[in-house]
Amino acid sequence: VAGNIAKGKSIFGIAGSYTSDANAVAGNILSGKTAYVNGAKISGTILSKGAATYTPGKTNQTIASGNYLSGVQTIKGDANLVAGNIAKGKSIFGVAGSYTSDANAVAGNILSGKTAYVNGAKISGSMIDRGLAQNGNWGCGSAGCGTGNDAYYAINSLPEGWYHSDGNEWAPEARINANTLRSQLGVSANKIAVGQNIAGINGTYKPTGANAGIHLTTASGNTCGGDWTLTSTLSAGTYIVATVMTNSAGIGASSRMDFGPAACGYSACSGVSVIKLAENISNNVVVGTRVVTLSKSFASGSPMGRMDTCADNKYGTLYGRALWVKIS
């Protein structure tokens, strides 16, 4: 028979199938299958592994050697396996983490137009870049700061949230050129009080109106009891008030003066305090000095004083004036 005749040989017309050069063993043949090897029938022992899916875990997973993979073996993936989902300093499946939980920046700490992630959240900055390139130096050094237009004025503080990108460093002793200071602040002599100097500029401003001397007076011909009224508005503040009153009929000893708002009976009341510093009475003349504090303004024409008695009608024509000088 063919199995008894060498492969490639023929006896009585029968072609041989016997071989002697095969080398498979049971472990090379699938379980449940058989084969002849050099005339011997062999039952296979290789296990067949069907389709399977593997979920990554904390430990390695293996497919035992000696298995025949008869189905697709799938290792699961996860779109969330990205750096932003992994703690900084840690690595998962070769992906280095970038997520942090200790950052504390907010929008106001980040420049406007820039973004950053803070603890996983994207933040758009709101800090304004002031720029603020300055003229001159930012420190006097050992040579001193100079005088006049070359002087430098210390800046001890800046507004919260101030940022500039001109390359200069701000510090408690940072200094700014006098010309620059004048330009930025709009400083000029007519905006500075007389006797004061700002950024090297001597002031020429003299207060007027409600900020300086304000006269109140009576009309000629008024007699005792006539009101003294404001000739212009008085703003809230503290004033030194000098008063002079004269009359044509003498009896100066009785020519005392009541002083304050008419609504308060010409004396201190709510919102108004009057402190008499001095008063000198001589024949026909009364001179006084007071400190008056107003918590509100009084309009031009408001009654603010009067002669206090009309007992004998001997006062004749009354003249008077009060000079208000604002001190705060």
Image (cartoon, helix red, strand yellow):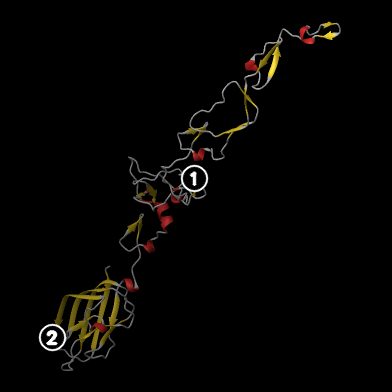
Point 53% across, 33% down: residue: 56
**Residue found at the very far right of the displayed protein:** 13
Compute the Cα span from label 2 to label 1: 84 Å
Disc 2 vs disc 1: Cβ atoms closer than 8 Å? Answer: no
Local packing at callout 1 (Cα closer than 10 Å; few below 14, some 14-19, many 20+) is some
Local packing at callout 2 (Cα closer than 10 Å; few below 14, some 14-19, many 20+) is few
In this picture, residue 104 sits left or right of residue 287: right
Q: State the SS at label 2.
A: helix
**Residue placed under numbered mark 2 in the picture:** 253
In this picture, residue 260 sits left or right of residue 69: left
**Residue placed under numbered mark 1 in the picture:** 116
Q: State the SS at label 1.
A: strand
**Residue found at the very far left of the displayed protein:** 253
Q: Is residue 134 visible?
A: no
Q: Position of residue 123 (x, y in %)?
A: 49, 48
Q: Is residue 246 above or below residue 45?
A: below
